[in-house]
Amino acid sequence: MVLTNPPFGKKSSMTVVNAEGESEREDLVILRDDFWASTSNKQLNFVQHVKTLLKIGGRAAIVVPDNVLFEGGAGETVRRKLLHECDVHTLLRLPTGIFYAQGVKANVLFFDRKPASETPWTRTLWVYDLRTNTHFTLKQNPLRYEHLEDFIAAYKPGRPDQRSQGERFRSFAYEELVKRDKVSLDLIWLRDESLEDSDNLPPPGVLAQEIVEDLEAALSEFAQIAESLRAEPT
């Protein structure tokens, strides 16, 4: 069994010194024969690495940011292979405001490794949405065990055949998943009431903090992009 929270930050990189003695950062593409795709995306590489660690019948619960669910290219390849070679049975959409990296949108992906098969092992992916219409912060309103009790009850450990759909818990068949654009697992069905009714908005202080956190996360991403662009030859 593997329970893990991968490193956040999109690219793997290294510092090199060019002919002029200047330091530059280059994206580091991971090449491994036991990986489905070669990429510099740390999260995708982490998912692939966790799969290789599992023995047949082994189980994984791994925290992944949203880009792992919908990114194209290597992301699509990893999702297709994961759905085929493993039983990807549950996805928990986590609320924002619960990680040290503020503004990060993350999920917990549950899957079991299976032996080689011509037919895909994933039959049904169950998705629990704990994000839509919920608001948490690290200090003022942290996520607690009681907030997860409904998910645990819906998950039904050891009794997956007894699961049933509810407002926040929905099932998606494998055939439906592979027909989605880029095999996206970014599955949303609940209406975000905060976008339509100002009465449902959180307190101004919470909103202001969320805006600050989102801006900090965006600035961090832009800084990484700017740094990678500076390293490119002109």
Image (tube, rainbow, N blue to C red):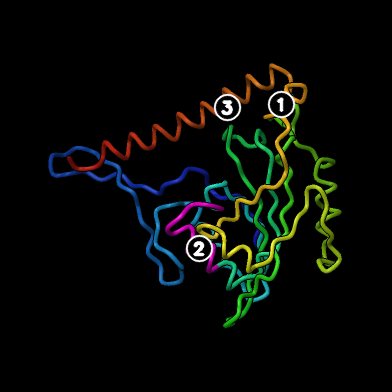
Q: Is residue 121 above or below residue 26?
A: below
Residue 139 numbered tag: 1
Q: CA distance from mark 1 to mark 2?
A: 35 Å
N-term-proximal mark, 1 vs 2: 2
* Residue underneath mark 2: 78
Q: Mark 1: give few (<14), some (14-19) or many (20+) Cα within 10 Å.
A: few
Magenta stretch: residue 75 in it?
yes
Q: Nearer the viewer, mark 1 or mark 2?
A: 2
- Residue at 70 percent across and 66 percent down: it is 124
> What secondary structure do most residues of the magenta stretch adopt?
helix
Q: Nearer the viewer, residue 201 or 153?
A: 201
State the residue position of label 3.
Answer: 213
Q: At 67% from the left edge and 29% from the top edge, which residue is drawn?
A: 195
Relative placement, left or right, of 138 versus 218 is right
**Residue 211 % position (x, y):** 59, 23
Q: Which residues are magenta?
A: 69-81
The N terminus lies in which quarter of the figure? bottom right
Percent position (x, y) of residue 64? 58, 50
Residue drawn at x 47%, y 64% as measured from the top left: 77
Disc marking residue 202: none
Q: Residue at x 68, y 55 (%)?
A: 91
Q: Earlier in the sequence, mark 1 or mark 3?
A: 1
**Residue 89, x across and y down, in percent:** 70, 64
> Residue 164: x percent and y percent?
84, 60
